[in-house]
Image: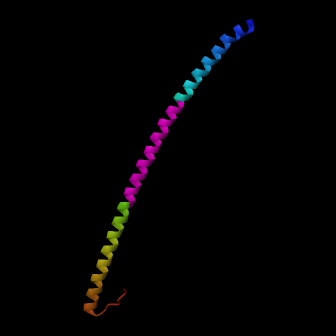
């Protein structure tokens, strides 16, 4: 019986140390979660900015192509009137 009495304080100390370590692990995991969420939000923001830039690039490319098509049409009309059109369309 006496051996068990001496073991209880050691067991209690071990449980206390284990509890303290668990609290530290939980705190570290919470900090990592916050860091991961922050990083994920930064990636989402960056992706949104890149998507917006790509959309703007696509729209400007379409506008440029439409303008070029208009210029080619006007040149064709001028050349047709002049009689030197090659009719590339």
Dominant SS in magenta: helix
**At 45% across and 47% down in the image, what residue appears?**
43
* The residue positioned farthest toward the top in the image shown: 2
Q: Residue 82: percent from the left, percent from the top?
A: 26, 92
Numbered range of the magenta stretch: 28-54
* The residue positioned farthest toward the bottom in the image shown: 83
**At 40% across and 52% down in the image, what residue appears?**
48
Q: Residue 12: percent from the left, percent from the top?
A: 63, 14
**At 28% across and 88% down in the image, what residue appears?**
79
Residue 6, picture quadrant: top right
Question: Which quarter shows the N terminus?
Answer: top right
Q: Residue 25: percent from the left, percent from the top?
A: 56, 28
On screen, residue 89 versus residue 33, left or right, reads left
Above or below, 21 against 54 in this view is above
* Residue 31 magenta: yes
Residue 89, picture quadrant: bottom left
Above or below, 88 against 58 in this view is below
Q: Residue 69: percent from the left, percent from the top?
A: 32, 78
On screen, residue 28 versus residue 57, left or right, reads right
């Amino acid at each position: 019986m006496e051996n068990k009495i001496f073991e209880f304080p050691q067991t209690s100390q071990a449980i206390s140390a284990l509890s303290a370590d668990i609290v530290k692990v939980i705190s570290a995991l919470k900090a990592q979660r916050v860091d991961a969420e922050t990083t994920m939000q930064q990636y989402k923001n960056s992706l949104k900015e890149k998507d917006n830039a790509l959309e703007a690039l696509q729209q400007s490319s379409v506008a440029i192509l439409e303008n070029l098509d208009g210029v080619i049409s006007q040149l064709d009309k001028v050349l047709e009137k002049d009689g030197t059109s090659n009719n590339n369309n």
